[in-house]
Image: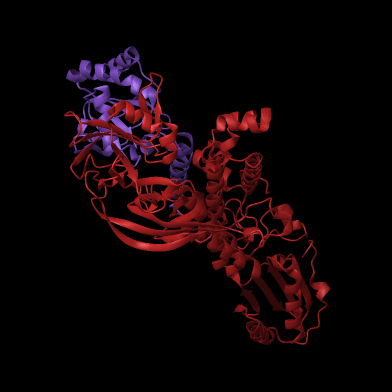
Chain colours: A red, B purple
């Protein structure tokens, strides 16, 4: 870094140009301004062409001090190092954000002991969302913007206002320099050089027997293009936190059901879920009989968009199909920024409805058949001359502490229905009948015994399901990860701009050659921002065409060139 | 250098503070989307047992005791008489008790309401939308929402008559 300029300095160059505070090389003629520097013979400091950065000024105010703080590359490097160290902390144990249904407060101590507990207590279990990490990112963002502005504007000005004739010292103290005898007439020789330089792609300007040749100046903007890309990247990441721009949820879709996707107007139907496993023959010997390996997970999904009655729960929403896709691992359904990924599955069947028949257990006579839904069933059914009114419904039948029938969960694990049947040969007030659709529950809860107690000894009615065709159940449930990330395109744009900046900055070099020919002497100075070796060869080959033989090494003016 | 320099610097620093403040703010306060005490109660639109759609906005200007329950949850069943008693006691003073059933069908809810004998408004959250927006995980959970629509306090677990009375008292006369 450069040391601060003393408070009072004469910034007026002998060529008459008034330079701003902090200028190293005169903006006009390129002569060093510092007296000590004038007497030295080392290479010139060509960073930003020796112009003052914006932040360098006399008597800085509060805003200038803040500005200066962020404009320092040293500070930027400290910030980047701190952020790197902070990021490393977040990789020690898994982050909370990767959990779905884990209680973080018990997970860390249980799995990692005391270290885990400390990790959790310090808040490192959510490093990347913590205030200090976000603060570091914000500071880096500020530093990016201010560093760039502080340098790019003065540099732009310096490069667009270049003078052709420079001070002799400016030329001889470049890292590529040459002072040699010139036998030809200066102006004619310079005119020949112009043509040769132009052939090599240089833009050439002349002023008498002085010349400035320059090419690939755009390569100097590469770093600033990278910074613009990084800022867009950071802003896009920040914008992910805004409502509606980012969604990530895991939802269950029982086969055959249409499920609403919360916070959107979309509904997704799982038409069929398939899971296939590798057969014994398909697996390598080592795995046979030991492992079950899945071959395929597939959800045949249809995406609907709600067109009317979307929010009013008292009305049925109207749906229109918008997309259809067979979701497999790494092949999500994608529609308008919404993506549905295969995530998990459950092969436990879930009962949806049954169609029992009301029969006379003694004579075998069938009175009628009706459809009984597990969710929102009808309240009254007709089977021949008998009327069945549904009185109670239990989704997961059980008994509470007081021995009363209750539902243990809202899921149809052990559904049970209490009917009041009225009709011929029954008591005037009707007869109560408990019905368990699942065979296991009939035995477990002793359905016959309960009904014998409710209906007495003369009981003759039974509800029975004829066959599997009368049972409707969802064979399996697929779990999908529904994602919306509208900031993602901007992340990619930012990354693309960074790439463009890298290409600009790395694949081209800004090369400049200053020439001054007079009194039989040729003075040449050259500057590039990288690949000095290639630059020297180019100069030698151009000079050779004007019958000037120069040793490549003699151009090297020292200074540790690459 | 340019005369516009200072204002430009100020504008840039201001924008950085604004964006930075937003970023840090959202990471410190409720970045996880959970509803906290003092936060604004999210609106809902749910079907009531009366067959009409009910929203939180209908109770604007009133203190609302929002109770999430399920018929399968034993503590929910046990706290129902207390809720009913407090509803009767406070309804004249601009307090409304609203029960939100979580994920059950109409028949279950109707039977339950009859069985425990309550008559405060009950709505059904079949899609678990309110559960999501209120960040409810265990049942019962009760939200005490003041007349300004802000969550005054959140009670997780069974409520008894006296705590309920205290909470409502605080809600009405802060």
Q: Quadrant of residue B173?
A: top left
Q: Quadrant of residue A38?
A: bottom right
Is residue A308 shown above or below A158?
A: above
Give left or right: position of B76 versus A124.
left
Q: Position of residue A274 (x, y in %)?
A: 49, 57
Q: Position of residue A540 (x, y in %)?
A: 76, 79
Q: Position of residue A167 (x, y in %)?
A: 67, 67
Of B92 and B61, which appears nearest the observer? B92
Furthest residue to the front? A363
Q: Quadrant of residue A26?
A: bottom right
Q: Is residue A18 visible?
A: no
Furthest residue to the top? B162
Is residue A98 shown above or below B63?
A: below
Give left or right: position of A29 versus A443.
right
Q: How many marks?
A: 0
Of A507 and B13, which appears nearest the observer? A507
Give left or right: position of A237 versus A378.
right
Is residue A113 shown above or below A173?
A: above
Of A62 and A343, which appears nearest the observer? A343
Of A194 and A507, which appears nearest the observer? A507
Q: Is residue A170 visible?
A: yes
Q: Residue visible at 74% across and 87% down?
A: A545
- Which image quarter holds the C terminus of chain B? top left
Is residue A315 shown above or below A225?
A: above
Q: Position of residue A78 (x, y in %)?
A: 65, 43
């Amino acid at each position: 870094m450069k040391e601060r300029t003393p408070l009072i300095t004469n910034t007026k160059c002998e060529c008459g140009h008034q330079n701003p505070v902090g200028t190293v090389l005169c903006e006009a003629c390129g002569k060093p301004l510092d007296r000590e520097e004038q007497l030295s013979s080392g290479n010139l400091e060509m960073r930003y062409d020796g112009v003052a950065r914006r932040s360098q000024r006399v008597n800085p105010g509060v805003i200038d001090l803040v500005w200066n703080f962020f404009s320092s590359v040293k500070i930027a490097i400290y910030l980047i190092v701190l952020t790197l160290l902070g990021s490393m902390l977040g990789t020690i144990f898994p982050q909370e954000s990767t959990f779905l249904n884990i209680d973080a407060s018990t997970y860390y101590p249980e799995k990692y002991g005391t270290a885990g507990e400390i990790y959790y207590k310090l808040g490192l279990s959510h490093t990347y969302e913590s205030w200090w990490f976000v603060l570091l990112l914000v500071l880096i963002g500020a530093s990016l913007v201010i560093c760039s502005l502080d340098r790019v504007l003065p540099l732009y000005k310096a490069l667009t206002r270049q003078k052709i004739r420079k001070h002799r010292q400016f030329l001889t103290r470049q890292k590529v320099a040459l002072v040699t005898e010139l036998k030809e007439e200066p102006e004619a020789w310079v005119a020949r050089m112009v043509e040769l330089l132009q052939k090599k792609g240089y833009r050439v300007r002349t002023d008498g027997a002085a010349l400035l040749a320059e090419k690939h100046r755009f390569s100097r903007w590469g770093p600033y293009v990278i910074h613009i890309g990084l800022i867009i990247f950071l802003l896009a990441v920040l914008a992910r936190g805004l409502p509606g721009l980012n969604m990530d949820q895991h939802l269950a879709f029982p086969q055959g059901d249409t499920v609403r996707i919360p916070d959107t107007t979309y509904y997704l139907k799982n038409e069929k879920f398939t899971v296939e496993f590798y057969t014994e023959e398909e697996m390598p010997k080592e795995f046979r009989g030991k492992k079950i390996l899945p071959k395929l997970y597939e959800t045949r999904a249809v995406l609907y968009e709600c067109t009317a009655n979307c929010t009013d729960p008292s009305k049925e929403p109207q749906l229109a199909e918008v997309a259809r896709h067979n979701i497999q691992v790494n092949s999500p359904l994608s529609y308008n920024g919404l993506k549905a990924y295969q995530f998990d599955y459950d092969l436990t069947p879930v009962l949806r409805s049954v169609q029992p028949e009301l029969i006379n257990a003694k004579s075998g006579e069938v009175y009628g058949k009706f459809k009984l839904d597990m969710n929102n069933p009808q309240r009254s059914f007709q089977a021949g001359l008998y009327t069945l009114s549904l009185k109670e419904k239990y989704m997961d039948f059980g008994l509470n502490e007081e021995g009363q029938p209750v539902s243990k969960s809202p899921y149809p694990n052990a559904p049970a229905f209490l009917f009041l049947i009225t009709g011929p040969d029954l008591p005037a007030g009707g007869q109560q009948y408990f019905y368990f659709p699942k065979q296991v529950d009939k035995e477990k809860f002793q359905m016959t015994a309960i009904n014998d107690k409710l209906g007495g000894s003369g009981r003759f009615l039974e509800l029975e399901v004829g066959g599997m065709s009368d049972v409707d159940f969802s064979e399996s449930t697929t779990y999908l990860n529904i994602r919306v990330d509208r900031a993602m395109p901007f992340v990619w744009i930012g990354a693309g701009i960074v790439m463009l900046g890298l290409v600009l900055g790395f694949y081209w070099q800004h090369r400049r050659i200053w020439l001054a020919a007079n009194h039989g002497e040729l003075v040449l100075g050259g500057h590039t921002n990288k690949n000095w070796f290639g630059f020297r060869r180019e100069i030698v080959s151009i000079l050779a065409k004007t019958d000037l033989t120069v040793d490549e090494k003699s151009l090297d003016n020292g200074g540790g060139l690459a | 250098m340019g005369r516009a320099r200072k204002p430009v610097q100020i504008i840039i620093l201001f924008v950085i503070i604004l964006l930075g403040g937003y970023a840090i703010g959202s990471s410190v306060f409720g970045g996880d989307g959970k509803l906290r005490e003092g936060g604004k109660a999210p609106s809902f639109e749910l079907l009531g047992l009366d067959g009409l759609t009910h929203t939180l906005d209908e109770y604007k200007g009133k203190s609302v005791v929002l109770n999430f329950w399920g018929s399968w949850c034993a503590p929910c069943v046990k706290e129902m008489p207390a809720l009913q008693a407090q509803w009767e006691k406070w309804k004249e003073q601009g307090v409304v008790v609203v029960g939100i059933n979580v994920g059950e069908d109409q028949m279950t809810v109707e039977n339950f309401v009859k069985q425990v004998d309550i008559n405060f408004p009950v709505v059904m959250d079949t899609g678990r939308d309110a559960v999501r927006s209120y960040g409810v995980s265990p049942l019962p959970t009760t939200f005490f929402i003041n007349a300004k629509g802000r969550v005054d306090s959140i009670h997780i677990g069974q409520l008894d008559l006296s705590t309920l009375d205290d909470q409502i008292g605080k809600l009405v006369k802060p």
